Image (tube, rainbow, N blue to C red):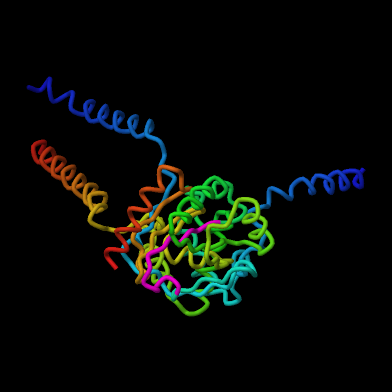
Amino acid sequence: MTSLKVWIPLAIFLLFCGVAAYQLTQPKDEFVESTMVGKPVPDFELRPALAELPGVSIADLKDGKPKLLNIWASWCVPCIAEAPHLDVLKRQGVEIVGVAIRDRPEDVARFLNQYGNPYTKIGADDLSEIQLSIGSSGVPETFVVDGNGIIRHQHLGDVRAEHVPVLLQKLAEAGAGA
Amino acid sequence: MNRAIASILAVLSLFALPLAAQQSLPPAPLAYEQLEDPAQEEAAQALMETLRCLKCQSQSIADSDAPMAGDMRHQVRSRIQAGEEPEAIRAWLVERYGDYVSYAPTVSETTWPLFAVPVLLLLVAGLILWRRLRKAS
């Protein structure tokens, strides 16, 4: 009986090593999810990010229509990759409202000229204030917001082809719930 | 010699410009600017050292030069300047990003074993020691 007890500390140590080794082989999750899903977007008002399009305020998110709130920037490389997929969503009748992080009007205009404009409105968030207030931790991120300004879904990272149906589904759910 | 180095540096600085792309705007007003009131700045600094930079996850926002960390420092300093309590600002961020954003340990539904297990181990160790000592005497 005592001979078995002797092995207990070693067994615990090996278990610990096993857990550590397993965790080391797991890919690191770089994304920090927002805990604002299900909660309303806080009040805000952003000046237009460029002269041609209006800015964005909380009233725009409470007009009864579910829409996408896309956090992006002209200096953000993955935002170039997601541009064609946002365009697909736009052509399917989705309204996409943009928030440009730390951006200049001329850079925003150049980006839209080059990669197309899926947005109906773009607000300029120079101090990441809206970004922080909705729990977004980087660019690009896309939020599904229902007609009452409540966040229904968060998509982290760039939107790829396989995410388009997911976002359409989430928008449909948001529309049914509003 | 110095002039040669200076001119080399001047030429090199031209190539450094594209690297500053994320920083096409100047940093937020209070990102690198300390608050005038030393007590407020001290409170802000203490809070910033315990908030996680979301873009560079092993650093605090006080430690990081990421533009987003600068914006978070601006957020912290401007709120403290407006008289908000540091813990209220932490709570505001935790409400948005979860406990992950804060380095300050809290006892919660998932973390309580971290606090309970050491106490338990101490109790067990104490009990074993007490029994041995009693046996020895």
* Outermost top residue: A3
- Note whether B113 is above or below A175 in the view shown: above
Residue name at image x 34 percent, y 29 percent: A21
Q: Relative to the observer, which residue lies in front, A5 or B96? A: B96
* Outermost bottom residue: B83
Residue name at image x 37 percent, y 48 percent: A165
| Percent of width and height locating residue A172 | 32, 58
Check the picture and name the quadrant holding the C terminus of chain A: bottom left
Residue span colored magenta: A60-72
| Percent of width and height locating residue B136 | 11, 36
| Picture quadrant of residue B32 | bottom right
User: Does residue A69 belong to the magenta stretch?
Assistant: yes
Q: Relative to the observer, which residue lies in front, A2 or B128? A: A2
| Percent of width and height locating residue A63 | 40, 74
| Picture quadrant of residue A67 | bottom left
Q: How many marks?
A: 0
Left or right: B112 in relation to B136: right
